[in-house]
Image (spheres, rainbow, N blue to C red):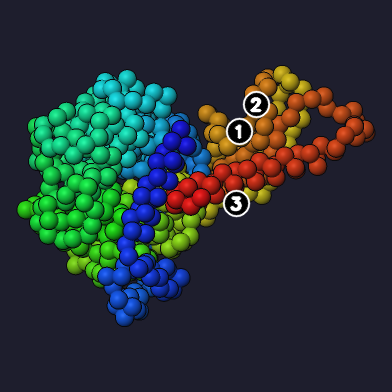
């Protein structure tokens, strides 16, 4: 399933790139390592002034981030607690009043739920059964869901992007279609299935039950009442641009994320324009931060701040807007006065490192949410993880900030055993808090293999391959070197046997496996950015 969503993201990046190339006389400037792309609408002097005005990120409000669920770089659909669970390109997140998190698990075409304790379950959908059918739990189907939102009653709303529909899930897991018709793209306003969308990617819901939609490939922001009546709040379908104004006068460029505050103001991640927009309840559109046509990663106020394909937005009770600045690989915060600060990540650096401020690393974060306690949640999309951040040096209830990331002192060793025989791999690691373990076979998590030792009493042929273990705690994680399981008669004592020595062979296999994993991850990162 990875290839399907990755292809979609590659296409998306190509669309954004094509839109950028369509602008006349593109110029490029350099500032502090951040590349700025400016339209000819900005003359050289204006570009120079803008570049010199961009401050370095000061991390005035750094958050400490940990991994709430999933394993960095490991794709799957396993339910479990923390790193015992796996995801497939999660793109959107939302959090309810009780601290439960909902995830649009895009590649798996399902909606996942994570409790405050990190227990992951599937709310609706099935990775083995994508489609557009309504139903309860695993009987319901989705197709590349990108965005999620949750209302005060616990109903979850889904931007079911591949189906061109908006879905609703009750707390009991009953799925219905709120608006749109599965498999039919368009731009029609109307009620329920009479309405049409074109690859909607973002969704938000207000206290009155109105749902707001980033109708991405139509370049519009739509509104759906609780009765399912769809109208266009702002933008004109098919006419991409970056104009401010009221209603249809405004223009957007492939908007991907939306959020709504208590006053009815809607915030938009205007992805193709590299800006964050604001729409009042009356439909008046302004640019909150960023400059259309200029990409970068600098903090600042209003137009002086720069973004690079922002995808997700969330807003807290104080009016602060949080942004998943995807291609900068950082999480930003915009104050109610328009001041932009980077709260985690380093511009241009990818990774799956937990830590505070610039020490934390992400890989193409696509979704963001914030709870009533100020904790920030991130769909770390290409890393296949859900991350959680908080102020004060740690995550509430876990004691982050005073611990030490795991280190491995004894690596697992390769094993040769007769088919049907027993085998065991073990690792010795330290860390504070005490680390947890997840064993992998050929890069896939082994269900239930969550201790420092993994043993099998009677082996089968499918168990041959490369074994690694991810050791993690709230301060970080580390992956062991690869150890292989091979089948064959063990050599007699004192004899080396024929052919290549087993130690050389095992080392070669381990290197090959590591090289293939590194190549796969590099290809995924490049594909997510539209690079061939």
In the depicted structure, whether residue 271 falls above or below residue 124: below
Q: From the top left corner, tell me how far across and down residue 320 is, in percent.
A: 22, 59
How far separated are the C-alphas under marks 1 and 2? 8 Å
Indicate which disc, 1 or 3, sits on the residue closer to the N terminus. 3
Indicate which disc, 1 or 2, sits on the residue closer to the N terminus. 1
In the depicted structure, whether residue 123 falls above or below residue 29: above
Q: From the top left corner, tell me how far across and down residue 471 is, in percent.
A: 56, 44
495 vs 64, left or right, is right
Q: Identify the disc placed on residue 441.
A: 1
Q: Which residue is mark 3?
A: 407
How far separated are the C-alphas under marks 1 and 3? 21 Å
Q: Which residue is mark 2?
A: 463
Q: From the top left corner, tell me how far across and down residue 392 is, in percent.
A: 35, 60
Tell me whether the residue at label 1 lies in contact with that at label 2, contact meaning CB atoms closer than 8 angstroms.
Answer: yes
When asked about the image quadrant of residue 277, the answer is bottom left
Which residue is depicted at the point 21% across and 51% down? 239
When asked about the image quadrant of residue 59, the answer is bottom left
Indicate which disc, 3 or 2, sits on the residue closer to the N terminus. 3
- Say which element carries label 2: helix
Outermost residue toward the left in this view: 282
161 vs 231, left or right, is right
């Amino acid at each position: 399933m990875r290839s399907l969503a990755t292809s979609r993201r590659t296409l998306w990046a190509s669309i954004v790139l094509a839109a950028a190339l369509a602008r006349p006389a593109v110029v490029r400037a350099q500032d502090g390592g951040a590349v700025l792309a400016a339209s000819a609408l900005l003359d050289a002097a204006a570009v120079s002034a803008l570049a010199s005005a961009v401050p370095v990120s000061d991390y005035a409000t750094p958050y400490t981030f940990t991994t709430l669920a999933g394993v960095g770089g490991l794709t799957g659909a396993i339910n479990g607690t923390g790193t015992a669970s796996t995801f497939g390109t999660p793109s959107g997140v939302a959090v309810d009043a009780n601290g439960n998190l909902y995830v649009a698990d895009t590649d798996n075409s399902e909606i996942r739920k994570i409790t405050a304790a990190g227990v992951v379950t599937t709310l609706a959908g099935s990775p083995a059964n994508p489609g557009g059918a309504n139903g309860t739990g695993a009987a319901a189907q989705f197709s590349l869901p990108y965005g999620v939102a949750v209302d005060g009653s616990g109903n979850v709303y889904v931007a079911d992007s591949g189906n061109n529909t908006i879905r609703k899930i009750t707390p009991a897991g009953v799925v219905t279609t709120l608006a749109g018709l599965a498999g039919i793209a368009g731009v029609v306003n109307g009620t329920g299935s009479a309405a049409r969308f074109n690859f909607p990617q973002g969704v938000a819901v207000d206290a009155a039950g109105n749902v707001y939609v980033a109708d991405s490939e139509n370049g519009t922001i739509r509104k759906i009442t609780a009765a399912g009546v769809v109208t266009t709040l702002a933008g004109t379908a098919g006419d991409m641009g970056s104009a401010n104004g009221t209603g249809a006068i405004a223009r957007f460029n492939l908007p991907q994320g939306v959020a709504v505050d208590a006053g009815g103001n809607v915030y938009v991640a205007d992805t193709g324009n590299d800006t964050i927009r604001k729409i009042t309840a009356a439909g008046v559109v302004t640019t909150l931060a960023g400059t259309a046509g200029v990409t970068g990663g600098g903090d600042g106020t209003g137009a002086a701040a720069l973004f690079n394909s922002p995808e997700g937005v969330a807003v807290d009770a104080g009016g602060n807007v949080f942004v998943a600045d995807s291609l900068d690989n950082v999480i930003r915060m915009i104050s109610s006065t328009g001041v932009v600060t980077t709260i985690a990540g380093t511009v241009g650096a990818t990774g799956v490192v937990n830590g505070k401020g610039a020490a934390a690393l992400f890989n193409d974060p696509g979704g963001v949410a914030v709870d009533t306690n100020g904790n920030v949640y991130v769909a770390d999309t290409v890393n296949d993880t859900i991350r959680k951040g908080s102020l004060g040096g740690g995550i509430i209830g876990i004691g982050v900030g005073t611990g030490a990331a795991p280190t491995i002192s004894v690596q697992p060793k390769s094993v040769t055993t007769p088919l049907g025989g027993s085998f065991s791999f073990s690792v010795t690691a330290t860390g504070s808090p005490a680390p947890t373990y997840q064993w992998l076979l050929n890069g896939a998590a082994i269900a239930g293999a969550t201790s420092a030792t993994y043993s099998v009493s009677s082996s089968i042929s499918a168990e041959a391959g490369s074994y690694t273990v991810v050791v993690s705690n709230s301060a970080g994680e580390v992956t062991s070197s690869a150890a292989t399981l091979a089948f064959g008669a063990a050599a007699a004592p004192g004899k080396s046997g024929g052919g290549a020595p087993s130690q050389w062979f095992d080392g070669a296999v381990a290197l090959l496996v590591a090289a293939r994993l590194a190549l796969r991850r590099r290809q995924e990162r490049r594909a997510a950015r539209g690079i061939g």
